[in-house]
């Protein structure tokens, strides 16, 4: 159901299920990638618990060119849950911030990718996602828990997200340029939503 | 692989401006001169201590009359029964406060506490 609308043009039921299956596989691989990156990130010491590097967002950035919006949503939800599991924040208020930030950032990255994809590389997409994610987290923190004092940490928080997202964007550029796995999928895709050109 | 496209540049620029603005906004030194903060329930007002004036702050019981004079703040008159706020005397340094609980008026002086200028508490050994 979730994936059916995207395949309307192909027609044949056999192709439909094939695509659905491969999409599910790709989502699973990227979700697993995200889980792995969450674990890597968990091992990196950080000054404040919510100052994350955002490594786990990389699969979502890569997924932008592979999936439709509902599929991306699924990937994002898997990423959020995976990250919550790894960080042990699944049942805490931090999870709420994480979920809000990830969803908002995914939506913005999707919007930037679809609307301005021609004129932007993954660097811009990544930065836009990071900034929006951080702002949403700050807003949630403001209204749910900390009140206006949360804005005292906003500048370094945003700066950190800005810097790490640049590196993530560069990595995504390199990855989409070089990965055979990725280019294999892109090559096979018939809708022709290309990431770079 | 670090090809920067036009919208990338725009996004980088906007983000950089936003972050710089936030840094300046958040960490620029707060006005160094102390300020008077008057609060009644959710409402609050700020006044400078530099000019003398008389304030009538409306509370549930009536107006509390607050004087600012020579950088000092005191309650001249209050509609409450206990008059503790009037008896509290004058405040002038950041961190000091007067409160009138019956009329729900909270008066405090805000600002950076200058440790060099801070007076020693009266202590008797």
Image (spheres, rainbow, N blue to C red):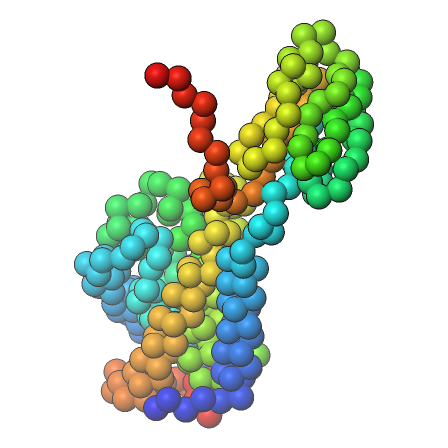
Position of B24 with respect to A38 (left or right) is right
Instruction: Pick out the residue farthest to the top.
Output: B81
Judge by depth and name the residue closer to the eye, A127 or A31: A127
Q: Position of residue A52 (x, y in %)?
A: 33, 60
Q: Quadrant of residue A46?
A: bottom left
Q: Position of residue A192 (x, y in %)?
A: 45, 87
Q: Split into 4 quadrants, where in the image is the N terminus of chain A? A: bottom left
Q: Position of residue A134 (x, y in %)?
A: 46, 59
Q: Position of residue B99 (x, y in %)?
A: 62, 21
Residue located at (64% from left, 41% from top):
B35
Q: Is residue B13 above or below residue B65?
A: below
Judge by depth and name the residue closer to the eye, A196 or A127: A127
Residue located at (50% from left, 52% from top):
A151
Judge by depth and name the residue closer to the eye, A51 or A185: A51
Residue located at (34% from left, 91% from top):
B1
Q: Is residue B33 above or below residue A121?
A: above
The answer, for residue B111, to whether it is visible in the render is yes
């Amino acid at each position: 159901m979730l994936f059916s609308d995207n395949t309307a043009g192909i027609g044949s039921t056999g192709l439909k299920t094939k695509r659905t299956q491969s999409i599910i596989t790709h989502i699973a691989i990227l979700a697993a990638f995200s889980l792995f990156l969450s674990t890597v990130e968990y091992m990196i010491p950080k000054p404040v618990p919510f100052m994350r590097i955002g490594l786990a967002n990389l699969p979502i950035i890569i997924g932008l060119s592979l999936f439709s919006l509902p599929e991306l949503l699924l990937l994002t939800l898997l990423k959020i849950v995976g990250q919550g599991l790894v960080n042990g924040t699944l049942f805490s208020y931090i999870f709420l911030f994480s979920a809000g930030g990830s969803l908002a950032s995914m939506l913005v990255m999707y919007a930037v990718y679809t609307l301005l994809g021609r004129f932007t590389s993954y660097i811009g997409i990544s930065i836009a996602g990071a900034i929006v994610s951080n702002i949403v987290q700050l807003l949630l923190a403001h209204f749910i828990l900390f009140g206006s004092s949360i804005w005292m940490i906003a500048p370094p928080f945003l700066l950190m997200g800005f810097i790490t997202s640049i590196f993530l964007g560069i990595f995504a550029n390199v990855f989409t340029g070089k990965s055979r796995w990725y280019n294999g999928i892109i090559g096979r895709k018939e809708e022709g939503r290309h990431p770079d050109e | 692989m670090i090809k920067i496209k036009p919208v990338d540049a725009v996004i980088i620029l906007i983000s950089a401006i936003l972050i710089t603005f936030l840094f300046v906004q958040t960490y620029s030194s707060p006005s160094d001169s102390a300020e008077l903060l008057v609060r009644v329930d959710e409402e609050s007002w700020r006044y400078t201590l530099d000019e003398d004036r008389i304030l009538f702050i409306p509370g549930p019981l009536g107006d509390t009359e607050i004087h600012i004079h020579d950088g000092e703040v005191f309650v001249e008159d209050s509609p409450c029964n206990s008059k503790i706020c009037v008896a509290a005397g004058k405040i002038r340094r950041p961190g000091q406060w007067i409160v009138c609980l019956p009329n729900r008026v909270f008066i405090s002086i805000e600002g950076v506490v200058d440790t060099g200028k801070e007076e020693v508490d009266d202590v008797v050994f």
